[in-house]
C-alpha cells in the first residue's frame, strides 16, 4: 500500500520565532537639533510653568541673530530649527484632553504623559520648525493617544 499525499490538506503553521525588541528610532535630524529638543523637553518637565514666560509656538535655540553683532555666533544658530511644543495641559489651565480612542475625559491623567518619538516638521514659507507633543494615557481603554489627535483638540 502506498500513501497518497492529500493536496488539499492544510499545512501546519510554521513555528513562531522569538520576538526581538525594536531598536530605538533613529533621529531624523542632526545632533545639535537632537540636543536642543532633548534640553527643551527636560526644561519643560522640570518647570511646568515655563509657558508663562515662553511662547509655546516658537521656542528658539538662538534669539536675535545678526551678522553685524560683536558677539561670536555659534554655527548651530543657523541650522537648528525652533520648536512649537504643544502640551495642552500645561498651556491651557485646568485642561484635561479627551481620549482620542474612546472620547472620554474621565480616564485620562494629564500628568501621565510621554514624549513622541519624533517631532513633526511644520513647513513654513520663510522657515521650518518642529512640532513637539506628547502621548497621553487613557486608563479606561488602556491605550495611548497623541495630544495632536483631532478628536482631542475639540
Image (cartoon, grey):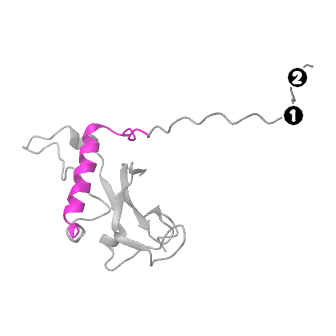
Residue designated by label 1: 8
Q: Nearer the viewer, residue 101 or 73?
A: 101
- Which residue is situated farthest in the right direction here? 1
Q: Nearer the viewer, residue 143 or 68?
A: 143
Give, as a single range, the part of the protein colored magenta.
22-50
Question: Image point 33% across, 60% down: which residue?
Answer: 85
Say if 66 sits above or below 84 in the image. above
Residue designated by label 2: 3
Q: Is residue 43 magenta?
A: yes
Q: Position of residue 56 (x, y in %)?
A: 30, 64
Determine crowd level at label 1: few under 14, some 14-19, many 20+ residues with C-alpha closer than 10 A. few
Whether residue 98 sits left or right of residue 30 in the image: it is right
The image quadrant of residue 28 is top left
Q: Position of residue 81 (x, y in %)?
A: 30, 47
Whether residue 34 sits left or right of residue 128 in the image: it is left
Whether residue 69 sits left or right of residue 16 in the image: it is left
Question: Image point 39% across, 76% down: which residue?
Answer: 96
Whether residue 103 sits left or right of residue 64 in the image: it is right
- Mark 1 vs 2, N-terminal side: 2
Q: Real-space Cα distance between discs 1 and 2?
A: 15 Å
Identify the disc placed on residue 44. none
- Which residue is situated farthest in the left direction here? 70
Question: Image point 87% across, 29% down: which residue?
Answer: 7
For marks 1 and 2, give the one nearer the viewer: 2
Helix, strand or loop status at disc 2:
loop
- Which residue is situated farthest in the top direction here? 2
Q: Is residue 62 magenta?
A: no
Say if 150 sits above or below 73 in the image. below
Say if 35 sits above or below 54 in the image. above
Helix, strand or loop status at disc 1:
loop
Amino acid at each position: 500500500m502506498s500513501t497518497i499525499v492529500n493536496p488539499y490538506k492544510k499545512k501546519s503553521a510554521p513555528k513562531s520565532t522569538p520576538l526581538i525588541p525594536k531598536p530605538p528610532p533613529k533621529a531624523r535630524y542632526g545632533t545639535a537639533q537632537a540636543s536642543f529638543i532633548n534640553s527643551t523637553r527636560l526644561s519643560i518637565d522640570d518647570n511646568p510653568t515655563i509657558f508663562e514666560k515662553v511662547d509655546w509656538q516658537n521656542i528658539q535655540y538662538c534669539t536675535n541673530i545678526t551678522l553685524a553683532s560683536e558677539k561670536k555666533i555659534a554655527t548651530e544658530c543657523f541650522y537648528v530649527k525652533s520648536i512649537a511644543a504643544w502640551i495642552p495641559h500645561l498651556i491651557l489651565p485646568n485642561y484635561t484632553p479627551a481620549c482620542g480612542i474612546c472620547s472620554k475625559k474621565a480616564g485620562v491623567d494629564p500628568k501621565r504623559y510621554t514624549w513622541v518619538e519624533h517631532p513633526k516638521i511644520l513647513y513654513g514659507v520663510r522657515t521650518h520648525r518642529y512640532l513637539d507633543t506628547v502621548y497621553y494615557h487613557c486608563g479606561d481603554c488602556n491605550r495611548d493617544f497623541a495630544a495632536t489627535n483631532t478628536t482631542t483638540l475639540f
